[in-house]
Structures are given as C-alpha cells and as structure tokens.
Image: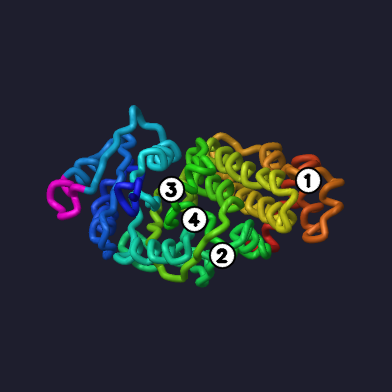
Amino acid sequence: MNRYKYKVTVGMPVYGVEKYINKCMLSVLDQSFKDDIEILAIDDRGPDDSIDIIKGLQESHPRGKNIRIITQPKNMGCWAARNRILEEAQGEYIFLLDSDDYISEDCIEKLYNQAIKHNAEAVYGSVRPVDPEGQYKEIGQDYLNQPYLVINEPDGLAKYANQSLHPTFRDYIWNTLIRKDFITKHNIRFKKAKFCDDMICSADMTPLVTHAVLMPDYTYFYVIRENSLSNYQYRKNIKLEEITESFRVYSYLKNKCKELKDKDYFETRCTKGMILMFYAVCGALKNRERIEPELTNRTIREAMKHPLSFHEIAGFRKHRFLNIVFYLIGILPSIISVIIIKVIGKKKHYL
C-alpha cells in the first residue's frame, strides 16, 4: 500500500505575487497528469490579495479541492516557506515552483514518467526564461537547456555538473521532481537566506544524488521581472545589505568545496565556486555608484578570500594558476585586489 496520499506535491511560497499567481496556479491545476496532484501554497503573510485569488480557485476549479493553503505564523521568507513544503508535502514526489513563474501543461507528466521509469531520486527539466508577457528572454545561460541524460552512479550528478568550468548543470532547486524519501533520508533543507536559498540547497543536494534524469524539454517558464532583487540594472539605488547578502551566499557555495576533497571533481568544483564569487564581485563593482552605503574595497577583497591554503592549491592538477590568482586577490592590500579584479573583469567583459 502506498503510504503517500498523492503521487506528486507541487509546492510554492506565496508572497506579493498578485499579478502572477492566477497564471501560476492554473498552469498546475490544468496539468495533463491524470493522477491527483496536491497543490501546496504556503501563505507567507503577503501584503496583497494573492491568497484570496488562490481561495477563489479552490472553489471554482475542478481540481480546486487539491489545493491546500498553509499559513506561516509570520512573514518568514522564501527559505522557510520552502522548508514548510518539504515538511508538509503528502506526495511521493515534490516539485517546487516559484509563484511568479509557471509550468508547461505536461510538466508533471513528463517528469514523473521519467522518475518512475528510471527509479530516479531527482528529475530535472529544462527552463525557458520569459518576460511577464511570456516572450522568450535571452539571459545568456544556455545551461538552462539540458541534454537528455540518465545517471545511475554515486557522485554521477556532481561529476556531470563539474566536468568542466563551463556551466553544464542548472543549479537551482525549482523545476526538479524530487522523491520525498530521498529528502527525508538526507534531511535536505533550505538554509536561511534573503535570496538564492535555492542555489545553496542545490549545492548541498547535488553530491548526494545517485539516480537522476536530465531532460531537454522546457517544462518551466522562469519569469524575469524588472523589480526583482537580482536585476540591479533596473533600479536607481541598491542597498549594501543586498550586496553583502549575495557575498554571504556565494561564500557558502565556494566554501562548500572543502567538504568534497575526496571527490574526483574537487578541483573543478573549487574553481567554479571562486568563479561564481568573482562574477558576484564584478556585478557589485559594475553597480558600485548606486550602492548605499558605500561598498568598500576591503569588503570586496574579503569576499574573494580563497577557502583553501596556498599549499593545498599548489597541489592542484587542474586550474592551479587560476586558483593562485584568486588566492592572491584575497590576500593582497584591498586597493590592489580591486584593481586586479577590474583589469580581469574588463578583459572578460564582466565589467
């Protein structure tokens, strides 16, 4: 007897998405998947009528009875809402969705069929970035589209993700069908963060996945909004705390490599963590004049601190020179560090 009430739980945090929630919810309610889907909406105490719109769909849609709303005790943030989904889900598999995005009509059917066929712990669909009107939006991340690939070996997914410095794997947690007993076994949770908690969770989860399927089908539509925290270019002023929070998140990602020293992909994973931080630093420098209060050179240098010692880096067989450069940036006087970052950033067209 199946101990799960549903085959799939689709869970979403809900906060301030009044303009988008109807389209998001309908994309789930109108799925081609024949079995019952639990739709779990976590009310994060938003200031608008998002939850009222969901309640209207509970009453009017044929699948409305499958919508379950759980209200947080107070506004706690996306990371906490996602943890609530992992804890409360009654489905054999869990699919996380941001409530300002939407999914293809056959999303769950395609992902679930692959999960069952290959006994997968996680199935990853491809992502289509769009503007709020649904038009394709080029954002320069071709790894959002993936090849068809079945992985059945320890460290297989992490090896694939770190086969080269070029991005080959979408390191987000949404648009992924994850088996709940896998989540429970490894106690997978989202860590507290104002944003990018999905990337942190993926960094924790990827090395644990043994059985996975990657699919080229676009099953998720990622809506690019001009006023989102990640889109600095559309805002007049940027709070310093946003920058320091992004540095904190990327520091976690680069420091994660210290737990993976016994893995074949360790050196590449370490280098990619430093490159991600370098991107973040260049993004901050590019928008430095709009950051309030001032972003100091010392803060920038500290963000670029390498997680490994010079002795450890000297023993690298791959990417040794690049890591030595990153190491030096993190220990030189801050003004010199920033000059070097600017020179490299301009050469690579990041600045």
Which residue corresponds to mark 3?
180
Q: How many marks?
A: 4
Q: Is residue 207 left or right of residue 266?
A: left
Dots 3, 1 in contact, CB < 8 A: no
Q: Is residue 319 above or below residue 329?
A: below
Q: Which of label 4 and label 1 is nearer to you?
A: 4
Q: Earlier in the sequence, mark 3 or mark 1?
A: 3
Q: Residues within 10 Å of mark 3 (few under 14, many from 20)?
A: many
**SS at badge 3:** helix
For the point 26% across and 53% down, the residue is 25
Which residue corresponds to mark 2?
151
Dots 4, 2 in contact, CB < 8 A: no
Q: Specify the amino acid type for callout 2.
A: Ile
Question: Toward the viewer: 64 or 47?
Answer: 64
Quadrant occupied by the C terminus: bottom right
Q: Is residue 134 left or right of residue 340?
A: left
Which residue corresponds to mark 1?
336
Is residue 39 something that shows in the picture? yes
Q: Is residue 62 left or right of residue 308?
A: left
Q: Specify the amino acid type for callout 1.
A: Ile
